[in-house]
Amino acid sequence: MSDYGRIGDYIGPVAAKKLSAVDIDANSSNQHEFGGNDALRRLLGTGEDRRASQGHGIPTALMYLSDDDAPAVADLETTWYDARRNNPNRSAEWRLYYKDCEPIRMARPGDLMCFGMLRDNRLLIIIAQHDSTAEAQAKWLFGIDDEQEGAFRFHDNTERELDAFGAQIFEALGINVEVRDDTYLPEMIGRWGYRFPSNEEFAAFSQSSLTDVDPTHDDPDDVV
């Protein structure tokens, strides 16, 4: 059993895609909107419109992750609506509208974007820098293979055990992650804040934490 519980204790399934230029260019993406394909509809539902302008948008935490800096986080309300609701002769066309904010301004084509509903009913949008350790960890956390540009794809990895990197993400969002006293999350946050350490930094930290094994004498399988 993980020291931090299951991923599903904190967040449901996610929808993910690789960002294209049109996704993040306000001049060409129809004022920051995503089309609501099947994956997003499964996450957000297809009931009533949730319009921020009318006071009942979706509370949203938007986070940009990279290896160089602490996560950039913005709290806002997003709008989820059927653009054809007043046209009964046409099928529904769901769209997600979002305002410009720092994490969106940091995003670049090729970055990974993940949507998921937190257990506190906020929508979490994570953007992870392309080809970074943060992106690799996000893919592992949510069970994502190599995404392609285009439509969002649905991923359910909620039964996987939460690791220290996932715990850092939730802590950065103000979500209390209950951990055992002997876990290393407090020390990791003390060393790196909420910045993701490089592979080399984390490998050195992991080796230094193995106080009860000797890799030079113990069985390799037991060390792992």
Image (cartoon, rainbow, N blue to C red):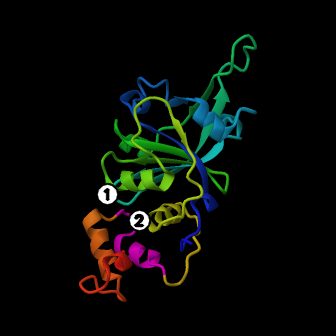
Which image quadrant: the C terminus?
bottom left
Asked if marks 2 and 1 touch (Cβ < 8 Å), the reply is no
Q: Is residue 96 left or right of residue 223?
A: right
Q: Where, by quadrant of the figure, is residue 48 drawn?
A: top right
Residue 176 numbered mark, or none? none
Q: Nearer the viewer, residue 107 or 142?
A: 142
Which amino acid type corresponds to the residue marked 2 in the rendered image? Tyr
Structural crowding at the residue carrying mark 2, measured as other residues with C-alpha within 10 Å and reported as few (<14), some (14–19) or many (≥20): some
Q: Is residue 198 left or right of residue 121?
A: left
Give residue 112's position: percent from left, percent from top: 41, 43
On screen, 70 above or below 113?
below
On screen, 90 above or below 208?
above
Q: Nearer the viewer, residue 218 or 154?
A: 218
Q: Where, by quadrant of the figure, is residue 82 drawn?
A: top right
Which amino acid type corresponds to the residue marked 1 in the rendered image? Asp
Give residue 208's position: percent from left, percent from top: 30, 82
Magenta span includes 185: yes
Which image quadrant: the N terminus?
bottom right
Report the span colored magenta.
Answer: 183-196
Q: Residue under label 2, please give it.
A: 194
On screen, 120 above or below 79?
below
Q: Residue under label 1, please give it.
A: 67
Residue at (35% x, 79% y) in the render: 223
